[in-house]
Structure formats: structure tokens, C-alpha cells
Amino acid sequence: MDYVEVKVKYSPASETASDLMAAFLADMGYESFVADEEGLTAYIVASQYSADDLEEMLQSFPMEIKYEVTDTFIEGQDWNEEWEKNYFQPILIDDQCVVHSTFHKDIPESEYDIVIDPKMAFGTGHHATTSMMLRHILSLDMEGKSVIDMGTGTGILAILAKMKGADKSTGIEIDPDAAVNARENVKLNNVDVNIITGDSSQLESLGQADYFIANINRNVILADLSRYVSALKPGGMMILSGFYSEDVPLLERAAAMYGLHTDCVLTEDDNWTSLRLIKD
């Protein structure tokens, strides 16, 4: 699949501006966001890219910024090779879980060994949001539990949950190509994880889970929160990430409306934050 890489440089390039920019771009179909000191880089399937729509969004952006846009067409290619060369190296999480790909050598030994060939799907453990979610799963008792991972990406979180003894682990992914990649990773790890292609409407057919996981941006979480809550057992835990610490009060207020209360908040690199909630 061909992509367009869009680099939006803006000033001032604050974390708040980057958060809003990623949220608006996500609503337009963009994925794989990378923020830096100059702005944001995002990727979108080439057939979905519209320079006019992007310009319209930037002109109506709710913060006063000066911006510059560069777009680059990226022909479909071997994304494993690109990750190996530029991004993805083996990572060890809390000395308990190692994440690596099939092309890696000299892999550290660990209790949980996860193989991920990421292609264009998000979730290798390197981003703070993914590593936080992995830490949550490592710290929790998954034995015999049911787990739903919304926006599963590479499938990494659903895979670890199953490795930790979950009786039933299900990943839902809206991007068909990412869902194919998640199924490939499930097969690589020889675990029984069900990957469903679709959006949150798929939750209606699954029943309620002990753990509901979603590493997605704030706007998507807020829009789909009622469905998330319906898919969680009373007393069950919801684990969310994909947002900044400034978003936590907004998310907590929305969660409280659906009978969820905060269990803990974790913040890591670049102010990325995760939130654990219990369903009353």
C-alpha cells in the first residue's frame, strides 16, 4: 500500500498544539504520528490524502500558529526493512518482557518473548504509550481473564495478555492492513488471539471482558467510551493511553458519567499518559 508522509512544521510547536494536531489528523484518517520540536509527522494512505482538506483544517486550527507543510509520496515497500534500518530495535520492558522482530539477533532473554514484524501498524513497545500499556499488563493478574484490545495495531498488547494467561484475548483493528499484520504477529507468537477487523461496533458481539484496553487518541476514546464501558464487566478494569496528562481531567469526567473511577495514572516520556479505571 502506498502512503503519503506529511510533515507539518508550526510555531509555537507546543505539546498542546501537537496533541490537537494529531487529534484532528486522526479524524481525517492519518496514522503513525511522530512529534518533534518542530511539529508533527503523520502518515496517510495515499488514496485518502487531500492537500485541500489538510489546508482547510490548518486554516481553521483552534490555536494561532504559523505553519509549513511538506508532503512526500511513499511507494509501497518492505516496511520491515524500513523499521529495521531506521526505527525498531529490540526492547526490554521491566526485565520481564522483550519485544523484537524476526530479523533481530542477540535478543535478551526474558520471561515473555514477543515477536513483532510491525510493517505500518502502530505498536512495537518503543513509543511511551505502548510501553506503558505493556507495563500495566505485566503488573496485572491476567490468569483466566478475558481481554479486549481496541485498536490493536500490531496485536502486541493482546498477545502479551494471552502470554500472561488470559483465557480469551481479542484485538479489534479498523485498518484492514494492520489487522492482517496483527494476525501475522499472532501466528509468529503461537498464541490464541482473535483479531477482528472493524470499529467499536464490533464490541456488541463479544460480550463483556475483565480487562478493556485501548491505546488510541483522546478524541476516539471520548467518542466511543459508552461502547467501551458496555464491553466491560462490573468491577472490570479499563486501561487507556494515547493522550497527554492535560487530557486526564477531561477523560476522568467523561468516565465518571459512565460509572468509572480512577485506579491510577501513569505519565512517561514527553508527557504521554495512561489511565486505569474501574467500572463500579
Image (cartoon, grey):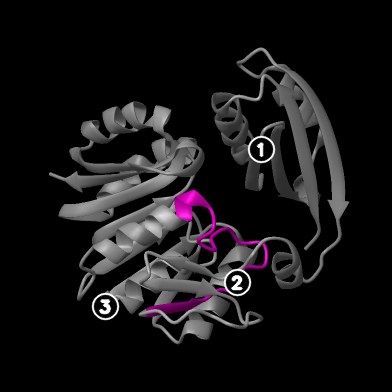
First-in-chain label (3 vs 1): 1
* Residue farthest top in this picture: 64
Can you give x and y, in whole percent of width and height, for residue 262 in the image? 21, 39
The three-letter amino acid code for the residue at tag 1 is: Asp
Q: Camera-side residue: 165 or 232?
A: 165
Inter-mark Cα distance, 1 to 2 = 27 Å
Can you give x and y, in whole percent of width and height, for residue 258 in the image? 23, 37
**Residue 144 occupies which quadrant of the picture?**
bottom left
252 sits left or right of 112 in the view? left
- Prevalent SS, magenta region: loop
The three-letter amino acid code for the residue at tag 3 is: Gly
Inter-mark Cα distance, 3 to 2 = 23 Å
Tell me the residue that label 3 is attached to: 165
Q: Camera-side residue: 160 or 269?
A: 269
**Nearer mark to the viewer, of 3 and 2:** 3
Tell me the residue that label 1 is attached to: 36
Can you give x and y, in whole percent of width and height, for residue 35 in the image? 64, 39
